[in-house]
Image: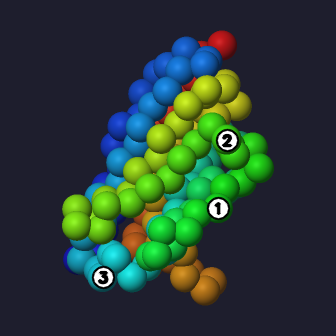
Amino acid sequence: QAQVVESGGGLVQAGGSLRLSCVASGSKFSINAMGWYRQAPGKERELVARITGGGSTNYVDSVKGRFTISRDNAKNTVYLQMNSLKPEDTAVYYCNAPLSGSFLFPWGQGTQVTVAS
């Protein structure tokens, strides 16, 4: 059964760093683009960073220069290195594989990131 499991969140002071991990199973991971998404309380879920099967990346403007997405296809894992964290980065972070109008995996539990000022 296709699924993703996110981990690595936590409570950190502003300016700190966290590294999120997402392990995917049950699908041809290496050929799919993968994305990290986040949802803050009262807000819509937004795409934060995306990486193609070939390793090309793109980011939402608010995290450019601070976040880095990467993947290890041998481990079916995608990472999000988050540096210089800000309180506005506080959210539940999810990963998924975006398709045209849908997503490859059911949404996982996500991992909570809380940045204290």
Q: Is residue 108 visible?
A: no
Q: Determine whether label 3 and label 2 are within 8 Å by CB.
A: no
What secondary structure is marked by label 2?
A: loop
Colour scheme:
rainbow
Q: Which residue is mark 2?
A: 65
Quarter of the image for residue 75 reads bottom left
Q: Nearer the viewer, residue 91 or 74?
A: 74
Q: Residues within 10 Å of mark 2 (few under 14, many from 20)?
A: few
Q: Label 1, label 2: how many angstroms apart (C-alpha)?
A: 11 Å
Q: Earlier in the sequence, mark 1 or mark 2?
A: 1
Q: Label 1, label 3: how many angstroms apart (C-alpha)?
A: 21 Å
Image position of 50 with respect to 52: above or below: above
Q: Which residue is mark 1?
A: 58
Q: Determine whether label 1 and label 2 are within 8 Å by CB.
A: no
x, y percentage for residue 49?
A: 59, 57
Q: Residues within 10 Å of mark 1 (few under 14, many from 20)?
A: some
x, y percentage for residue 15?
A: 60, 19
Q: Residues within 10 Å of mark 3 (few under 14, many from 20)?
A: few
The amino acid at mark 3 is Lys
What secondary structure is marked by label 1?
A: strand
Which residue does the image show at 42% across and 27% down from the upper left?
Answer: 10
Q: Residue furthest right?
A: 61
Which residue does the image show at 61% across and 48% down from the upper left?
Answer: 39
x, y percentage for residue 115?
A: 58, 23
The amino acid at mark 1 is Asn
Image position of 52 with respect to 31: above or below: above
Question: Is 74 on the left or on the right of 15, as rendered?
Answer: left
Which residue does the image show at 56% across and 31% down from the upper left?
Answer: 83
Quarter of the image for residue 53 reads bottom left
Q: Is residue 97 visible?
A: yes
